[in-house]
Amino acid sequence: MEKRKVPPLPPGPLPIPLIGNIRGVDINAPWLAYTEWGKQYGDIVYSSLFGQHIIVINSEKVAIELLEKRSYNYSDRPDLPTNALFGFGFNTILMRYGARWRRQRGIFHQAFRAEAALCYRPMQRRKAEQLIRDMLDAPEKFLNHVHVFSSSVIMSASYDYETKHDDPLVKLIGKSLRLAVQELRPEVATVFNAFPILLRLPAWFPGMSLKKKAIQSREWLGEWMHDPFQYVLERTAEGKAQSSMVSNALRRIGGKETSDEITTIKESAATAFGAASETTDLILQVFILAMVLFPEVQVKARTLIDAVVGASRLPTFEDRSSLQYIDAILRETLRWHPILPLSIPHASVDSDVYEGYYIPKGAVVVPNVWAMSQNEQKYPNPSQFSPERFLDADGNLNDDTVNMAFGFGRRICVGRHFGDASLWIAISSLLTVFTFSKRIGADGEVIDFEPRWSSGIAIHPLPYPCSITPRLRKVT
Ligand code: HEM
């Protein structure tokens, strides 16, 4: 009988035998090499690392074709041993496709789908006002204020927990997340996948510092998962629990809860904090950097805000439709420097054939959002921060909502409506009250700088000199 021919793998760089494609890939910024490969080999590129198949998607078109139109086959996540090692086995974002993921996703959907997300707006506005007060008090601590804002909106939505200054819980979760974002890279995990024996070496063994960090991570995560959940249980027992993701989910299961259901709620809420606080925080950091580097955008935004809102109050969500330029700034912030340049990797459930290329079962499928957002055909002069890309000739928003920043298909970000509202209210409030600029040195000259970026799954600008000065001292 004639043997059926397997189609070729997508094109890609030549691998080093047994190791794969590490040559020319900067482990701290692999999206740059992947984007170069895209220019050479096309929108879909095959590479491998220690035997793991990696499919890099360099265009929105292919991402939609595979991750959305064939989502039945591309909604899994790679099974990375470092996730469980670090105690992140519970996390909705990193979880394999299946019943446990579906249950958690259901809890998220109830709390954060488009209509449900509207109920958090008064709280988001209140937190934005607090952000402005904190910035007015100590503008030089802006990174801390942005972090507190981002953490407190989600702590309120998930647990109805009001964060305090220097909140121990926020600090705990923050350091735990920073560790995870640094270490849980698929490129690192692949090494452990290929050599599982490494996972059995003790933490003191040379080169096994990762294992030491993992022990610390698991300890922190235990507290992160338990403490705020316990807070809701106590408030419920006292009859004081207000509406939140956790209290509403507990109410829905009523008296018939099983330990499985409790665990699902607990795990979803713990995921929410990490997913929401880190992304919101990093995007606001990118926004402030962009304002410092592109002052003309602030001038335009302020002229509009002054005309629509005036100089005595902060914008509200009711002003949003009259402030379309602010939405364009938000979209351009997501595009200009995506904080998740390689999104979150998907994985194929089964083998597949796309455009004549073979995609193996279990391949790690990496949406290269960096390449998509820097696509010169779609976004000419991509390093320029230009909100006008998202406006038509009449100043109205166009159809490009930069969806790629929130992922694709069945795994698309389930908190995107809530996240979008937090970002909009923070950005519009900050633009109303402050001017962001480069710092002036002792010699009276502007201090110029080249932005530098952190590494990891989620990235942010490294510290740079800037000045944040209030335009308005008092707003209601
Ligand atoms: C504010 C900006 C945010 C950005 C840019 C962002 C981005 C993303 C991206 C790229 C993914 C992966 C999608 C994929 O695999 O295709 C994701 C997943 C996820 N996000 Fe967000 N996110 C944001 C805010 C939030 C918020 C506020 C929440 C919670 C309220 C949240 C909860 C989640 C969850 C639970 C997942 C996992 C979905 C799944 O695997 O099924 N995110 N997000």
Image (tube, grey):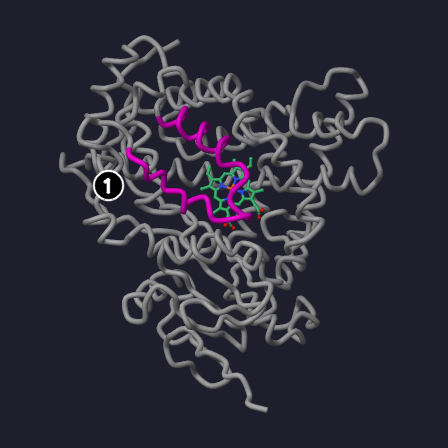
Q: What count of labels does the image hold? A: 1
**From what the image shows, is residue 1 above or below residue 415?**
below
**From what the image shows, is residue 295 above or below residue 61?**
above
Q: Nearer the viewer, residue 132 or 263?
A: 263
**Image location of residue 225, percent across then percent down:** 70, 40
In reply to whether residue 421 is colored magenta, the answer given is yes
Q: Nearer the viewer, residue 62 or 122?
A: 62
**Image location of residue 187, percent across then percent down:** 50, 66
Q: Nearer the viewer, residue 226 or 261?
A: 261
Image quadrant holding the C terminus, namely top left
Q: Which residue is disc 1 drawn over?
A: 385
Residue 336 as seen in the image, left or right of residue 341 = left
Quadrant of residue 133 within the rendered picture: top left
Residue 107 as seen in the image, left or right of residue 447 = right
* Mark 1 residue element: loop
**From what the image shows, is residue 330 above or below residue 58?**
above
Q: Residue at x 61, y 68 (%)?
A: 208
In reply to whether residue 121 is colored magenta, the answer given is no
- Say what amino acid the circle numbered 1 marks: Phe
Residues drawn in magenta: 398-427
Label 1 Cα crowd, 10 Å radius (few <14 / some 14-19 / many 20+):
some
**Image location of residue 455, percent across then percent down:** 42, 55
Residue extending furthest toward the bottom? 1
Residue extending furthest toward the front? 1
